[in-house]
Amino acid sequence: MPDYQGTRAVPRLELGEAALEFIQSQEEFIGTKVLPIFQTKKKASIFPAITRESITREADTKRAPRGNYNRDTFQAKDRQYNCEEHGLEGPLDDSEREMYATDFDAELTTVQIVTRRVLQAQEKRIASKVFDTTVFTGSKLFTDFSSAPWDNISSDVIAQVRAAREQVRQNCGMEPGTLIMSKANIDRLLGNEKIKAAIQYVARLTEAEILNAMADILGVKRILVGKAIYNTAKEGKAFQGADIWSDDFAMVAVIGEGQRLSDPTVGRTFLWTADSPENATVEQYRDDAARSDIFRVRQHVDEIIIDPYFAHLMKVDA
């Protein structure tokens, strides 16, 4: 646990764990699955990223009798991260605590709301970096399928995804195992003629089973569906919901998980654990002037694209 000397804030790990468990059960956020968390003790650093050139370069493995073995070398390109702090506070007035005491856990509800908003902001940052046509540009990184969009039930989505997967393999020698898309696009695929024909005789009951069947058809190990929305209206105006993950795009990607930076991956979320031990660190302090307990949720992170050649972005809407 970090040293909290010099502040009145008290860590509330149990509230953070409970709030995250509830939010994760809703399955709306996929950002840290697309750019998995890498825990670091440094706020900022330069790190060596293994290049596609290193993992695909032909090696001379032949050894002559009594001769020496050839020695392999690998190339790494320097990449940099710089974690920035994000956070939000939610007050719980003493009168509100008493008012809601018999109805629900006011502390947990406050933390859940604030945590969700912090993670929603992170989700939006990640989505904007992943579906970025200024990073994923050129024929090796981007294909425009808008002439055969996914909302057209006769579009050959299977062939489109196959072509994108093959391009990643040509780029880096690895098959992308993940397909990333919005909730609207997964709904469109459920109505696609070729996909419906492929799964019509397979008994599928749950959403997870349907996604698994669709992943098999499209040649990936899993499909990540971004379901989160945000309110685009200014404060005080009528609600206007919009998807965080754009309907315009989908992506196939190689995603490295775990705590090894040597694993090939399109990107990472760096979490500075010396300051924020969790992706949503919860703290509490007292504001006597407002007769309120203040619940702070914060994170020290940097979400970065490490190597775009481990992914392929597709424009799938007209």
Image: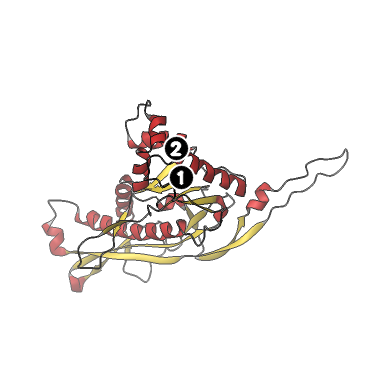
Residue 112: x percent and y percent?
27, 55
Amino acid carrying mark 1 in the image = Leu
| Residue 30 appears in view | yes
Labels 2 and 1: the sequence-earlier one = 1
Residue 26: x percent and y percent?
30, 46
Q: CA distance from mark 2 to mark 1?
A: 8 Å
Quadrant (top left, top right, bottom left, bottom right) of the N terminus: bottom left
- Measured along the vertical axis of the image, is residue 243 above or below residue 85? above
The reply to whether callout 2 and callout 1 are in contact (CB within 8 Å) is yes
Say few, some or many: other residues with alpha carbon within 10 Å of mark 1 (under 14 / 14 to 19 / 20 or more): many
Circle 1 sits in a helix, a strand or a loop, which is it? strand
* Residue corresponding to mark 1: 179
Q: Residue at x 41, y 33 (%)?
A: 213
Q: Which mark is residue 310?
A: none
Say few, some or many: other residues with alpha carbon within 10 Å of mark 2 (under 14 / 14 to 19 / 20 or more): some
In the rendered structure, the answer to whether residue 178 lies left or right of residue 79 reads left
* Residue corresponding to mark 2: 215
Residue 196: x percent and y percent?
38, 33
Q: Nearer the viewer, residue 240 or 37?
A: 240
Amino acid carrying mark 2 in the image = Ala
- Measured along the vertical axis of the image, is residue 204 above or below residue 110? above
Circle 2 sits in a helix, a strand or a loop, which is it? helix
Residue 40: x percent and y percent?
50, 58
Looking at the rendering, which quadrant does residue 101 occupy? Answer: bottom left
| Residue 272 appears in view | no
In the rendered structure, the answer to whether residue 25 lies left or right of residue 50 reads left
